[in-house]
Image (spheres, grey):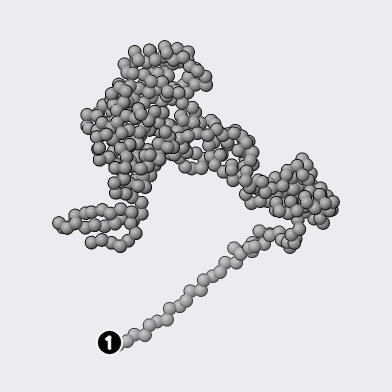
Amino acid sequence: MTTNRPSSSLKERGLGGESVFFIERGLSYRGCPKQSCQLNVYDYLADIPDNAETTDLVEVQFKNTRKGFYHNSNNLPLEKGDVVAVEASPGHDIGTVTLTGKLVLLQMKRTPPKNPDDIKRIYRKVRPVDMEKYEEAKAREHDTMIRSRQIAKDLGLEMKIGDVEYQGDGNKAIFYYIADGRVDFRQLIKVLADAFHVRIEMKQIGARQEAGRIGGFGPCGRELCCTTWMKNFVSVGTGAARYQDLSLNPQKLAGQCAKLKCCMNYEVDQYVEASRCLPSREIPLETKDGTFYFFKADILSNMVTYSTDKRIAANLTTITAERALEVISMNKEGQKPEALDNRAPSAPQKPIDLAAQEDLTRFDNTRKKKKKKKKPQAKTDS
C-alpha cells in the first residue's frame, strides 16, 4: 500500500507478515544527529538513494569543535551519528560521524584539509572494548587540565591551558592553550610527558576558539555562533558599530570571549548600503524658520532628525531623507523653504486625564441586589 502524499523518504514496515510501504513527509530523520553536538550540519541528502556511495569520504567530529575527514576504505555502512574508530598517529581515535555522501565534498571546499593526500582512514565501528578505553581517557581530562595549569605556572610560562583532549586510545593528549605572545614550552612538554605518561601535543587557539569549545548562550538568547555553526572567524572592528549607530560601550559590544561580537558583521553591509541614501551629516539645512543641524538618523527607516542647536537637542524635527535632500538642493539654488517639514500639521491631541476616566465615587454607591421571590409551584394531583 503506497500513499500519494508529498514525500522525502520511502520506508518499509512489516505488519502481520505483510510489507507495508509508507512515505514520510517533511525532513528526513536520518539527517538529524543522534545526539546534540557542536557545529552540527543537517544532512538533507541523507534519504537520497546511493548518496553515501558517491564518495568514500566521511566527516567525523571529536570533542567540541574538532572535526576531520576520513576515507571509508572498508566500505562500512555508516550513517550520521555512528561512533567509529579512526586512524591516528599513533594508535586510533574515537569520533562520531557527522556527514556522509555529497555534502562532505562541499564541506571540504569550505574547510579544506592542509594536505588532501594525507587523509587517514576509518578502521571500524566502535566495539565495547574501544568504548571502555575511551571513557577512561575522557574521565582523566579535567584533572589533567587542572594539574597542567599548575605545572605551567610553576615554570613561569605566560599561557593559559583552556582545555585538554585525550585521544580515544589514551596514548596521546592535546593541550589547547591561549597566549598573547610566543611561548617556549619545550620544557613544559617534557614535564607533562613525565607526569601523565602520554604523547603531548600543544595547540594554540584564540579567545574566539576557546569560547566556541566551551559553549554558552549570547544576549540574543541563542547558542553562540562559534559553537553552533561558525568555524572561520573574521576580524570585527569598531567601524561596524559606528555604521549601525551602536553605543560604543565595551561591555555591550563584547561577547563572552571578551572580543567584539561576531554578529556585528552580519548586517553592516545593509547599513552601509542604506546609509548611502542619507544626506551628509556635515550639511546644515537652511529654512526661513532658521538653520537646522544634523542630530541623528534612523538608517533602516530612512528618517533623519535635525536640531536648531549644534550641541544639544533643541526643537527636534524628524523628516524623511528625501525631504532633507530636497532642502539641500533648494539651498544650493539659493532658496529657503518655509518650514523644514512640508507635511500638513496634525491636530494637537488633548492631554488625557487618567483620573477623569473613571468616577472616583463609583465604590461609594453600593448596589443592593434584589432577591427575586420564587413563585410557589402548583401541585398536581397524580
Q: Is residue 312 visible?
A: no
Q: Quadrant of the C terminus?
A: bottom left
Residue at horizontal 43 percent and vertical 34 percent from the top:
111
Nearer to us in this view, 79 or 136: 79
Quadrant of res 374 = bottom left
Q: Is residue 241 visible?
A: yes
Quadrant of res 174 = top left
Residue at horizontal 63 percent and vertical 41 percent from the top:
243
Amino acid type, mark 1: Ser
User: Which residue sits furthest bottom?
Assistant: 381
Residue at horizontal 65 percent and vertical 45 percent from the top:
275
Q: Residue 267 appears at what percent x and percent y? A: 57, 43
Q: Which residue is mark 1?
A: 382
Q: Is residue 212 left or right of residue 24?
A: right
Residue at horizontal 34 percent and vertical 85 percent from the top:
379
Nearer to us in this view, 292 or 120: 120
Q: Residue 376 appears at what percent x and percent y? A: 40, 82
Q: Residue 224 appears at what percent x and percent y? A: 47, 38
Nearer to us in this view, 228 or 78: 78
Task: Report helix, strand or loop for mark 1.
Answer: loop
Residue 179 lies, with reference to residue 266, above or below; the image says above
Q: Is residue 14 left or right of residue 55?
A: left
User: Which residue sits furthest front?
Assistant: 117
Q: How many marks?
A: 1
Q: Quadrant of the N terminus?
A: bottom left
Q: Is residue 122 left or right of residue 158?
A: left
